[in-house]
Amino acid sequence: MGRELVADIVVIGGGTGGCAAALAAARAGRTVILTEETSWLGGQLTSQAVPPDEHPWIESFGCTASYRAFRDGVRQYYRDYYPLTAEARANRELNPGGGFVSRLCHEPRVALAVIERMLAPYVSSGRITVLLRHAPVRAELDGDAIVSVDVRSLDSGDVAHLTGAYYLDATECGDLLPLAGVEYVTGAESQAQTGEPHAVEGEARPQDMQGFTYCFAMDYLKGENHVIAKPEQYDFWREYAPDFWPGRLLSMTGVRPATMAPIAYDLFPGGSSLPLFKYRQIAARDRFASELYRSDITLVNWPQNDYWLGSIIDVPEEERQRHLYSAKQLSCSLLYWLQTEAPRPDGGLGYPGLRLRPDIVGTEDGLAMYPYIRESRRIRAEFTVLEQHVSPECRPNGKAEAFADTVGVGCYRIDLHPSTEGRPYIDIAALPFEIPLGALIPQRVGNLLAAGKNIGSTHITNGCYRLHPVEWNIGEAAGWCAAYCLDRDLGPSAVRANPEELASFQRMLTAAGVELRWPSLRAM
């Protein structure tokens, strides 16, 4: 046995939800151990290199105060350390990348710097202990309570033995759940189980999950040649044509997720079609002085590099590694195709000046440190959010279900990418929704809370509860809840079941800047 570490709260997974959970617990005066499998804290925002997906009201309301502090911190970081133009510097709603997926597109390293600054006072004081490059390998239980969790260093192989009063699973795939024997669900539930209009007919499909993506950053230096070596699986991916696609996946034609009708893409702005380069652009050259950038920089998380040929959850390790490798090959093949075969407006083929930017994502191969995981294991929770709670098709009054135990808010379309068993997109409207505390609480294990995409949602509702500000809110609520329970010597179930305790906890959240209700808004 290696090191033995003790804290009030152990957070396994240092992604978006895990960082928010650790920050909340530390602000509540509790000691925290925060582990992370990669070299960067932040998850979707950093190691997965996914610019924020957010709702249209994010600049005014609809997120926690700490998430807003993160967003403000990103803009201030650019103002403090980057040579912005005068116009960009004066813009209160600065979008450094100019991408249109979000009103705040930024480089992963900036998000990392801001998150580390937010955690720094508590790390320096010893209230938060961070273990990077550590993954959970074992959990010990005593009845219905977790006693300890072991994490192994991915560098040295040494094992650290972690002990706490509460354990929060904020891993990307819900990796603590099977280790701790926590009951959970994977994949697509059936209509018979949930009654959801868009659930699958017939039997449930536990291995039918949304595809995942290895994102990468690139810029474009016209007239130069930055063509990568031909990927090993390029010939396969060049010819791959899904049944539900208009043609080959590697092309400039895709589908509109809501209708599955064909849609044409352009690579750069100026044509008549959607410009993919601009979509998730994270550095807009014209917003910086002194010719800081030689080119705009974009983050490639496009329909063409979604990987859905197999699951990486609850499969043998050899199969998992095979799918991870093939997903990397798909992303590399997309880049190679863009460099060598993509049709240009001038009638030529390929953009050899497209340059992979490994420095932007902090890896040698140029791909993100970790795949963008859209769908996790999900706890069998005290309460499960269904399509009927959030879909305008099921809510004739035009409002999502109001939960008495709300611990936050979120809003995003029910957006499911093509699945590992060959089902196409599901993209339907959702109403601005609340996050119920019951969805964070397992039915049995009493000192574990879900702190990310592993809450009590379904395959369908995961599609709108999985985005950046929602995951942050879930993690933050879990951190505050664990601290509240320690202060009151109560379990999360007891807090939820007692109206007076629940109201007291919600007052704590409100004082911390967590919004619990929406004003009247349209569906998204």
Image (spheres, rainbow, N blue to C red):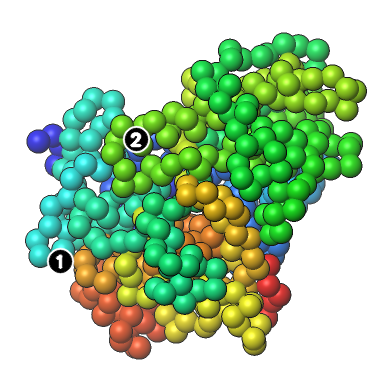
* Residue drawn at 35 percent across, 41 percent down: 36
Residue 131 appearing in the image = yes
Q: Secondary structure at mark 1?
A: loop
Q: CA distance from mark 2 to mark 1?
A: 32 Å
Work out whether residue 269 or residue 246 is closer to the camera in this orientation and state it.
246
Q: Position of residue 254 (x, y in %)?
A: 71, 43
Q: Looking at numbered disc 2 in the image, what kind of residue is underneath it?
A: Glu
Q: Are marks 2 and 1 in contact (CB under 8 Å)?
A: no
| Sequence-wise first label, 2 or 1 | 1
Q: Looking at the rendered structure, which numbered label has been put on residue 144?
A: 1
Q: Looking at the rendered structure, which numbered label has been put on residue 239?
A: none
Q: Secondary structure at mark 2?
A: helix
**Residue position marked by numbered label 2 in the rendering:** 319
Q: Position of residue 497 (x, y in %)?
A: 30, 84
* Residue drawn at 39 percent across, 65 percent down: 203
Residue 65 appearing in the image = no
The total of numbered circles placed on residues is: 2
Q: Position of residue 69 (x, y in %)?
A: 57, 55
User: Based on the displayed image, in which of its 4 quarters is residue 317 positioned?
Assistant: top left
Query: Where's the C terminus, which quadrant?
Result: bottom right
Residue 76 appears left or right of 385: right
User: Based on the displayed image, in which of its 4 quarters is residue 22 positioned?
Assistant: bottom left
Work out whether residue 299 or residue 505 is closer to the camera in this orientation and state it.
299
Q: Looking at numbered disc 1 in the image, what kind of residue is underneath it?
A: Asp
